[in-house]
Image: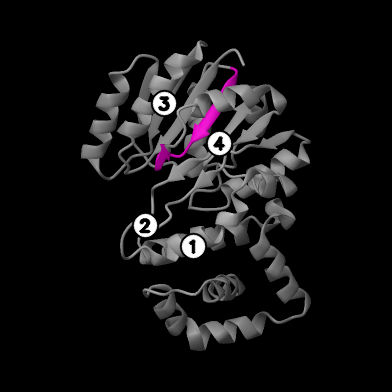
Amino acid sequence: MESLSILIPVYDWDCTKLIKDLHFQGLMLGIPYEIIVADDCSNDKDILEKNRIVVESHENCRFYALEHNIGRAAIRNFLADQSRYEKLLFLDCDSAIKDKQFLQNYVDAADKASVVCGGVTHPDEIPHKGVELRYLYEKNAAFERSAGFRSQNPYLRFTSFSFLIDRPVFMAIRFDESYVRYGYEDVQFGHELEQNGVSILHIDNPMAHLGFENSEAYLNKTRQAVLNAFEHKEEIGESSKLLNHYNKVLKFRMRWLFRVIWTFFQKSMEKNLLGPEPKLKVFSLYKLCYICLL
């Protein structure tokens, strides 16, 4: 790798420590690099200004503050359009670097595939009360986080949380900007990578996920994601477990049953999911019932 653009979309999150850590590691690489941060019209203007000050005080760093929220897909495309270098490293803002060789690990793997995914880890213990649903969901998926497991279905396990990609490859595919709400834009992107025969490599170079929203907010985001999946079911194809289950429901003409379950058990399911001991089986049923309403 001869040069690197590090691209970070931000929304209502203090990413100053992440920027400082990345800048320090970037200096050690010995190649041209840049860090570009784009704020997608955050509500918290104090955090926006704090991020701006830190980014603009560091060499090789640029900050953009958008006047209107354009969404998770479009903001990543915007960042790519501002980039100058041959490799693009997309990182979510609500994360922390765990390894002092984080950037170097990506550099070492850069020439092995057009796309390199580093992975994600989560805290061993729940960060605080009220986030039980998101934390339990992520904790249950911990066994799927290793590079070995992800490599078994490399495109299906693609995530936009942290990945390196050849700039020409990204510019040819890009994220589908019709995804304005939360969810599934990275699922479709992984599907597009597969359809275009783009090589992908999974490595163990995880970032720590820090952004755990409360259960009510996460349930709302989940409904948005399900709606995204439904609206883009033709584009996503078989890359979504939820859509695969939904197609089986349609095949056996059982959609009516899940609508009945929703009618009589929506409140009790939500009570469980918003409580201190949510059950993931209830969560799965909730999503399947919801998509059957659409």
Image quadrant where residue 274 sits: bottom left
Q: Which amino acid does label 3 sit on?
A: Leu
Q: Is residue 265 above or below residue 56?
A: below
Q: Mark 1 points at which residue?
A: 222
* 10 Å crowding of disc 2: few (<14), some (14-19), many (20+): some
Sooner in the amino-acid sequence: mark 2 or mark 3: 3
Q: Mark 3 points at which residue?
A: 22
Nearer to us: label 3 or label 1: 3
Q: Which amino acid does label 4 sit on?
A: Asn
Nearer to us: label 1 or label 4: 4
Nearer to us: label 4 or label 3: 4
Q: What residue type is labelled 1?
A: Thr
* 10 Å crowding of disc 3: few (<14), some (14-19), many (20+): some
Locate residue 292, reporting x and y percent: 61, 74
Using residue 59 as the reference point, say whether residue 107 is left or right of it: right
Spatial separation of the CA atoms under disc 2 and disc 4: 24 Å
Colour pattern? one colour
Does dot 1 land on a helix, a strand or a loop?
helix
Q: Report if the CB atoms under discs 1 and 4 are less than 8 Å apart.
A: no
Magenta residues, start to end: 86-96
Q: Which residue is drawn at 42% across and 52% down?
A: 123
Spatial separation of the CA atoms under disc 2 and disc 3: 25 Å
